[in-house]
Image (cartoon, coloured by chain):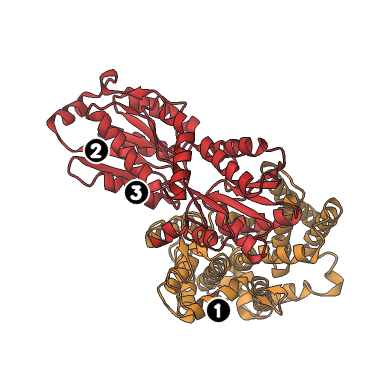
Amino acid sequence: MKARHVILMAAVVGLWPLAANAKSRLADFALAERIKAKVEAGQPLDIYVSYHDVSNEFAPFMKAGVERASADDTVNAQFIGPVGADADGQISEIETLMGRMDGLAISSVSTDALAPLIDRVLDAGIPVVTFNTDNPDSKRLAFAGQDLIQSGREAGKLMAKVLGGQGKVMITTIDAAAQWSIDRESGAREALEAEDGIEVVQTLNTGTDPQEIYSAIENAMLANPDIDGILSLECCSTPAAGTWVERNSAADRVKVVGFDLLDQTVGLVESGNVQAAIDQAPERQGFEAVNLIVDFLNGETIANLDTGVGIYTKENIAEVTDN
Amino acid sequence: MTDLVGAGARGAAMDRFSLASLLRARETGVFIALAVLCIFLSLATDSFLTSLNLLNIGRQVSLLGIMAVGMTFVLISGEVDLSVGSTYALSGLATGMLIVAGWALLPALALGLFTGAAIGFVNGVLSTYGRLPSLIATLGMLSIVRGVALILTGGQPVTVNLRNGADAGVLQAFSFMGQGYLFGIVPMQLVFFAVIAAIAWVVLSYTSFGFRTFAVGGSAKAARVSGISVNWVKIWAFVVMGLLAAFAGILSLAFLPSGQAGRTGLGLELDVIAATIVGGASLAGGEGTILGTILGVLIIGVMRNGLVLMGVSPFVQELMIGLVIIIAVGIDKWSMRRSG
């Protein structure tokens, strides 16, 4: 068994509570008559998948998953969402399309802002599931994706491991106030604080522009030259942190653990400037989001679905580059 | 008539650099504010006043500075350009895509710069012959250009490296533009900023185009009566802006060899306008200097750098930067009223 599979299994076991959540079934749901008629007539189902920012790096992967799920004639799935994380834009678009949707999968810009809308769509007899970013405040039927707190915890454990349980850690994020960031940070801090020898020095909010991100890390490393580890909570400060390590020849004294497999990150993992990157399988998230709704409408019982975490290090990153 | 306007503007520009006017120059207030900020940060943190940090600040403000130089032309001409962040993204990403596609460096750079100049030209034509307020025209272009960048890249990051197909020699030269050091010390981005600022200073202070830009922004009606082609002066100011935004975007990709259309340069226009205004340029037109813009850019850059060095909470940082912009411009306006 490959090391990666062991790690994946461990991660899935760690995420078991996510999969053990309540189940939803059509018999308990007041499905809208027009949708019921379409299902009974075997007509193609119009399912909308609303992602919180269709202009970010992961949108193309999510979209590919949605397209894979709608490859046959029975499902017509559309990938929609705002350009930029715009809650108003996401709400308006869903409101506009409500009359024609047979199911909605949503990754919310803001859990608070979108929860009432999700409940309104459900009240109209339209099944709603969440994907990528959950909205537990709503009455959504199920969630397909990664448990963000748990994935933060995994990142924290990895950082503790590469530091040998000793050192000062800086957490970086492109948006410290976003729900996904808050969730991952809480998980990461929990795992890091469990180690007596590790101190979390600060959380650095880098902004989203690549130049801004790099400059913020550069300044913070100058202000705190004794930092031993940088834990990035997302895609985009991970390669910036790795680039800083590479340009300062600091791989032996500053370790980086981050998220997602952007091209640049893969190269930095290969060169040993990023010790580990956690992948969240975005294509599968888009695919499973559509499938959950289709299964639900076909009468199957659905429950939360963990799309898993993949942990990539120098030892197994070739699996990505070979593909 | 043209000569009268030109002479007036030339006189104002030259007066700015006489010794007698130094103390009452507009830049003096901004310079004092910057000096106070630097002294405070030097006392508050050990890391601020080090050669490494000062060179870091120089590099970190360079791209903002290059764009702010362009914005100085646009603001002096009495217009504003909100599309610069999108231009920065599209031009940089387009250049990167061409390099990855195997193009040689010079044609790729030329096409990237042409993209920026063309966007500037469209902004200029819409704001003059199109009779649209530049605020509206460039707001529309902000969205159009960002949309083009997203369509062009399909939302995928553009990473310029050997694996994606860049030629090794081209990659080396391109990387040097963004990551290299002159004499092994001065970051190339800072060198580009200094050269561009020097050229812009000469153009604004000593050339007919510079004088006409001041004249058009000070009073378009008087400039028109003087025989100046107001529309074309403004169009050229927008073209300069587009060209410099494109160059900054290209340097950005050369520094960090990866960009993404949904994130790169997002909201950058506000930083560029803020730095230029802090430096003394006026949204009403006819006012602004390159020296003031450099000082404005430095205030924003030093502030961001200093707050991180001091370990200030990221949320407080946003608040502090906003306060500094308001206070710096407020002091400037207050001192102008007193002297005027």
Counting from the top left corner in percent of width and height, residue B2 is at: 61, 78
Between marks 2 and 1, how big is the CA–CA gap? Answer: 51 Å
Crowd class of label 1 (few under 14; some 14 to 19; many from 20; radius 10 Å):
some
Disc 3: host chain:
A
Taking B101 as reference, is A217 above or below it?
A: above
Seen from the viewer's position, the closer of residues A226 and A236 is A226
Q: Residue at x 81, y 58 (%)?
A: B38
Q: Amino acid at mark 2?
A: Asp
Marks 3/2 same chain: yes
Crowd class of label 2 (few under 14; some 14 to 19; many from 20; radius 10 Å):
some
Q: Residue at x 54, y 53 (%)?
A: A236
Seen from the viewer's position, the closer of residues B223 and B311 is B311
Taking A239 as reference, is B124 above or below it?
A: below
Q: Secondary structure at mark 3?
A: helix
- Residue denoted by label 3: A63
Which chain is orange in the picture? B
Disc 2: host chain:
A
Q: Secondary structure at mark 2?
A: strand
Q: Amino acid at mark 3?
A: Lys
Question: Which of label 2 and label 1 is nearer to you?
Answer: 1
* Residue A309 in sight: no
The quadrant of the image that shows the N terminus of chain B is bottom right
Figure colour of chain A: red
Counting from the top left corner in percent of width and height, residue A42 is at: 14, 33
Q: Quadrant of residue B204?
A: bottom right
Q: Residue at x 52, y 40 (%)?
A: A151
- Residue denoted by label 1: B173
- Residue denoted by label 2: A46
Seen from the viewer's position, the closer of residues A156 and B161 is A156
